[in-house]
Amino acid sequence: MKRSVIITAIALAAFTTQVVAKNENNSASHNVTISIPEVALLDLEGASTITLAPTAPEEAGEGLNFASSTDNSVWVNYSSVVASGQNRSVNAKIDGTVPEGLQLKVSAGSYNGNGAGTIGSSAGNVILSDKDQEIISGIGSSYTGNGTSQGHNLTYQLDLTDTDNYQNLMEGNTEITVTYTLTDK
């Protein structure tokens, strides 16, 4: 009887080992989800306030010189991650009224910096108004780098619309807010 118990125990152990071996593999797997967030951040670097002023004449009989009414001390930085097939643009608009007889223009320069990705391109000179206007287009998943000399340099220009409008010029300061928005296209 002792011998049959031992043989039964050995047979039971062999059967259990086969069942366990049949349920186990030499590899296993599970799923990993990679989730990239949408990103849409815009910042202006450089001067927080700029002043545009024509040069006063030095001789009687001359008019104001608007050639020096420019500023390029502000840079647009952005970080963007978009969905497949999508892109973004940077739009600009003003809050306030440009004095009669004048126009305020802005242009975004070509990209400069140490960013990467699908960087946008300049839309050229834009006359600012209270309506959003595209100044940078074609932005995909990208980043420009942070700070001045990174991204797109903004150049502002104040112009007299026509010498026939010279009589509309009035001495004084006018404050205008320019708002930039990184928006889906």
Image (spheres, grey):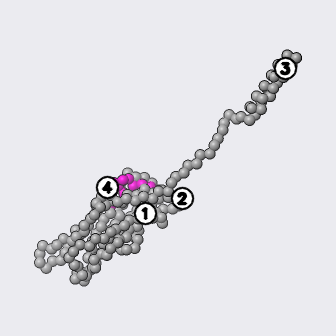
Q: Earlier in the sequence, mark 4 or mark 2?
A: 2
The residue identified by callout 3 is 5
Q: Earlier in the sequence, mark 1 or mark 3?
A: 3
Contact, mark 2 vs mark 1 (Cβ under 8 Å): no
Q: Nearer the viewer, residue 132 or 163?
A: 132
Gap in angstroms between the C-alphas marked 1 and 4? 18 Å
- Give the x, y percent position of residue 141: 47, 56
Contact, mark 4 vs mark 2 (Cβ under 8 Å): no
User: Residue at coordinates 28% horizontally, 60% vertically from top-left?
Assistant: 47
Q: Earlier in the sequence, mark 3 or mark 2?
A: 3
Crowding at dot 1, Cα within 10 Å, few <14 / some 14-19 / many 20+, comes out as many
Taking the magenta stretch, the answer to whether it contains residue 150 is yes
| Type of amino acid under label 1 | Leu
Residue projecting furthest to the right: 1
The residue identified by callout 4 is 148
18 is higher (above) or lower (below) than 43: above
